[in-house]
Amino acid sequence: MKLSFIGLVFRQVRSSLRHLCWSHMLTSLTMALTLFVFGAFMMLQANLEQLLMAWGDQIHLTAYLARALEATELEGLLKRVETLPEVERVRYTSQVQAWNDFQSALGAQSGLLEGLPHDVLPASIEITIKRGQRDSSTLEQVAQRLRGEKAIASVEYPQQWVERLGLTVLAIAWGKWIVGGVFFLATFFIVGSTVKLALYARRREVEIMQLVGASETLIQAPFVIEGMLQGMVGAALALAALWGGYALLREQIEGFAGALWSVGHVRFLDLEGAVFLVATGWILGAIGSLVSLRRIVKTWRSSEVAV
Amino acid sequence: MRIQLRHVSKTFPPRQRALADINLEISKGELVFICGASGAGKSTLLKLLFREIDPSEGEILIDGHDVTRLRSRGVTRLRRKMGLVFQEFRFLPALNVLDNVALAAQVLGASKKQSRVKAHQLLRELGLKDRYDAKPFMLSGGEQQRVAIARALINEPALLIADEPTGNIDDDLADDIMQLFVKIRDRGATVVIATHHRALIQRYGARVIKLERGFITDASSDNVSMPEYTW
């Protein structure tokens, strides 16, 4: 595109923004509304993932030792377990520590333990598996390897819970794409329709540009730029509304969700999410304008009337 | 530009016939008047030439190329060689008179400055030097018509198509405008004018094509011996 065309395109955009201010604002608000719903879904999904992650952090393998080990023998065992590729960290609990933990867990009832020898509970190793590998098959593989150690008497982990958690993670991942895709398509069509309505108001302008010999690119460029601007303004408004809603409702949600699932903090969209939302608005605005413009110009051409 | 129409018909839905079996040839550098009563098909014929509408049947050749087969890029290229004066003017309401005229040059790649200088010059020639900053809706019918003519002339077209260009203008001004069209013709451009203006046709030595209810009833007459048309 020639330099003089770029100047012309931006003059047209400026003129349109000035003269059709209300129409542009209406389109931006519609986009904001749709992107708000899309952004709210993104937030919900990010917080669900965080919740699952927090639950995943509580999954451990517990390997009970067959007997009290010499310091060097214990050190060797811990090193071997620690170097397994799936293992994130290990924590050793001695027999004494296990006894103390059990006692403090019983609290006022700890008197029940009187008369029992202090080495009645076995020493153990608590093994945390790396994030992303906390599925039942990996856990079972690690458990099998640990069972091969002579010093380990038994290995336990909450198998059923791990399986359920795995299924939930999978469902959320699929849901993210399916619901996200549906929201994206809905946003695309709503934006397309809004842009189409705005374009009908400017039918004359497009026709005149065509008749004076303006190229398709020159006709479309201002509309695409306006669409991009509308999308970005819409996304910025959606982000602001999401932030407002988040600030207003965070405490209530945290109180409610915390009571149910012992959740820590409800998170706002991270920088990546916010940039994604603005980019979505930007792209939707541009593509919505382009597709709608092409479609309705075609309709105008085929709707001849007698002269 | 040389124009040839071969068996061109145009019917608007559902069954409104506007033109029937038109055969016509206009040479390069010729000035032609198309006359006829309202509804005779004059505007339809002009719209076919710049491909605002498509014919129902037949071929329209401009410089040997069938315009009915052009894709949108080809139509754009064709229109860039044309100057169009519409009966209903068609201005961008947000732009002032000067920018409406300059726009036609800018879309062809002229700079803002170049196009404004040219637009200034043309508007002055057409007696509109005090109206540069006015918005189109602030102008009288005659003034709007002159702005439309200035816009059509700014790119020095090879084919000028004008639909009732003197419709809202007094005789003196109509003469000035015709002089401009003759100048364009003398430079080698083809000029096709649809008009009701009988006196104007009689004053200028040009071929007259008469349309009646979509048919050409006379395509060879010269104004020197022009019969009394009944439009």
Image (cartoon, coloured by chain):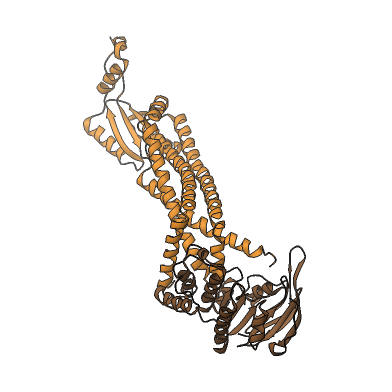
Chain colours: A orange, B brown
Nearer to us in this view, A255 or A289: A289
Q: Residue at x 35, y 31 (%)?
A: A264
Does B161 sit above or below residue A84? below
Q: Residue at x 54, y 67 (%)?
A: B140
Q: Is residue B7 visible?
A: no
- Residue B225's x, y, as percent? 72, 89
Does A68 sit above or below residue A77? above
Q: Quadrant of residue B51?
A: bottom right
- Residue A181's x, y, as percent? 52, 47
Count of labels in the image: 0
Does A149 sit above or below residue B181? above
- Residue A208's x, y, as percent? 55, 67
The quadrant in which the N terminus of chain A is found is bottom left
Left or right of residue A193, residue B3 in this image:
right
Left or right of residue A150, residue B228 in this image:
right
Nearer to us in this view, A194 or B175: B175
Q: Is residue B212 visible?
A: yes
Q: Quadrant of residue B133?
A: bottom left
Nearer to us in this view, A303 or A118: A303
Nearer to us in this view, A226 or B162: B162
The quadrant in which the C terminus of chain A is found is bottom right
Residue at the far left in the pictured view: A71
- Residue B44's x, y, as percent? 68, 72
